[in-house]
Image: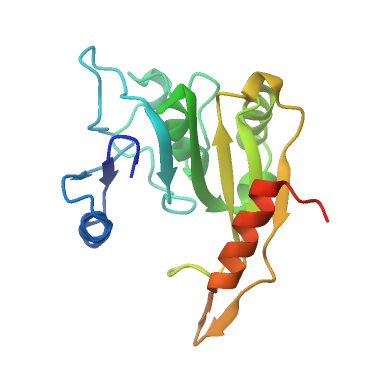
Amino acid sequence: TRRSSDLGQEMDNATSALARMNMILHNNATAKIWKGNTLVDPQWKEANGQLKTFDFAVANPPFSNKNWTSGLDAEHDPFDRFNWGVPPEKNGDYAFLLHILASMKATGSGAVILPHGVLFRGNAESKLREKILKRGYIKGIIGLPANLFYGTGIPACILVLDKENATARKGIFMVDASKGFRKDGPKNRLREQDIHRIVDTFLRQDES
C-alpha cells in the first residue's frame, strides 16, 4: 500500500481484501487497493504511462518468488525498473525492491520487508545490492525474529529506504531486533514493547 496517496496493489485475493479492510479500519475508506500483479501490470501510473511515484511506499512482497518473471520481459521493462540489472529468474526479492524504489519520489521514503538473504546473497543480487548501496538509498536495516510470518520460518528484515538524503548518507543504521518476541503457538509474535523498542531505537539512532 502506498500511503501518500492511499493507493496499493496486491495479487492475492485474500490479502487484497484484508488490505482494503485495514484501510477502512484506519479511517481510509476511500483508499484504492487494486488486485493484480504489481510487477507485470502495475496499475498506478502517470498520464505518460510511467510509474506513479509517491512520498512514502511500504511493501511486504512474497519472499523469494520463483515465478516473478512470468508474463514479464524484464530485459525490456517499459518502466525501466531493471536498468541496474535483472534479478535472478528464480528469486524475485530484488525485483520487488527495485519496483518500490522506482515508485518513490526523489524525496520519497519507504520500507520493504524481505528475507535476510537479500543482505548477503551473491551473483546478480550482489551487484544490485552494491549499486543500491552506492546510491545511498538504504537508510537502515532492522533484523526481525525468525518464524514471524505465515508460510515461512526464515528470518526477515525491514529495509528502510530514503531517497531525499541519499547523497549525504555515510552509512546504514542497523538494528538487531531478532531476540525480542514472544512464542504464540507455532509462530513468534512481536509484542507492543518489542515494536516500541525497535521504533524508538531507530528514531533516536541509539547505538547503545
Q: In which quarter of the image is the N terminus?
A: top left
- Residue 103, horizontal then vertical, whole percent: 39, 28
Instruction: Tell me residue 61's x, y (percent).
Output: 42, 49
Q: In x, y percent, where is residue 140?
A: 65, 42
Quadrant into which the C terminus falls? bottom right
- Looking at this rendering, what residue extends furthest in the right direction? 208
The residue that appears at 57% across and 42% down in the rendered structure is 160
| Residue 132 shows up from this direction | yes
Kindly tell me whether residue 35 is visible in this rendering: no
Q: Residue 155's quadrant in the figure?
A: bottom right
Compare residues 1 and 147 and report the one nearer the observer.
1
Q: How many marks?
A: 0
Q: Quarter of the image holding residue 37?
A: top left
In the picture provided, is 208 more to the left or to the right than 127? Answer: right
Q: Is residue 133 found left or right of 195 in the rendered image?
A: right
Depth check: 80 or 51 in front? 51
Left or right: 70 in relation to 131: left
* Location of residue 74 in the rendering, given as x and y in whole percent from the top left corner: 40, 26
Residue most extreme to the bottom: 185
Residue 17 location, quadrant: bottom left
Residue depicted at x 28% and y 57%: 26
